[in-house]
Amino acid sequence: MVNTKLFNGVYKGKKVLVTGHTGFKGSWLTLWLLQLGANVVGFSNTQKTNPSLFEILKLKKKISHFVGDISEFNQISKVVKKVQPDIIFHLAAQSLVKKSYTDPINTFKTNSIGTLNILKASEKSKSLKAIVLITSDKVYKNVEINKGYKETDILMGNDPYSASKSCAEIIINMYLNSYTNNKKVKICTTRAGNVIGGG
């Protein structure tokens, strides 16, 4: 059921690119955006969660679906140039801490270089208004406190996954300071925590 009144109808008719749309959070975001009246375009690799909410909801039939590797600049750049999105949500990631220990190189390529790739590829869209980059609450230096971390706390993940996401935050900060002379595109990061839900 489409409800274009939520968020003052800001997503109605907008072309929204979601990277990592086949993953757990990406599938939920894709479903939600569709319900808000957005035209969703997804970019993700071939890996799917098990069970796969993406497949359960039959999202492939409801969106424009592109398969690719976020760590390969030319792949994401071609999609952005073709699609010309209004908004980008970047969720594509190697999100497993345990896997990051056994495959740190691909974890950094996906999480760190992949973030730089989406930022540089975003320049190919003349209609782009906003980019939301999802990192992690694991970006903070673990100082063993009994309260939540604040946005101003030190970034310094200790394990490969956390460090790759800390690097992504540094890349985002660098990009904001070095490449955003054009202020028409709003860029923000969100540091998501663990999520429990369907799928």
Image: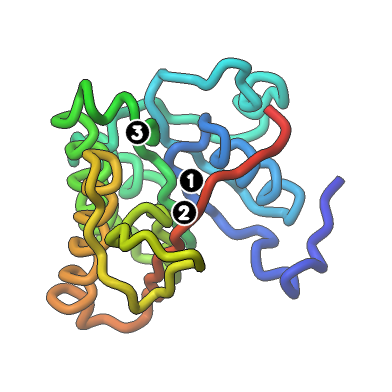
Q: Gap between marks 1 and 2, in whole Å?
A: 5 Å
Query: In percent of the image, x 23 and y 28: which residue is there?
Result: 101
Check disc 1 and give the amino acid type.
Val
As displayed, is residue 65 above or below residue 132? above
Which residue is disc 1 drawn over?
18
As displayed, is residue 1 above or below residue 95? below
Q: Do labels 1 and 3 touch, CB within 8 Å?
A: no
Q: Gap between marks 1 and 3, in whole Å?
A: 22 Å
Between circles 3 and 2, the one closer to the viewer is 3
Q: Do labels 1 and 2 touch, CB within 8 Å?
A: yes
Instruction: Looking at the picture, tell me which residue is in the foreground, 16 or 170.
Output: 170
Quadrant where the N terminus sits is top right
Which residue is disc 3 drawn over?
97
**35 sits left or right of 193 in the view:** right
As displayed, is residue 36 above or below residue 8? above
Circle on res. 35: none
Residue extending farthest right: 1
Query: In percent of the image, x 82 and y 51: which residue is there?
Result: 2
The secondary structure type at the circle numbered 2 is strand
Circle on res. 89: 2
Q: Gap between marks 3 and 2, in whole Å?
A: 22 Å
Give the quadrant of residue 62: top right
Check disc 2 and give the amino acid type.
Phe
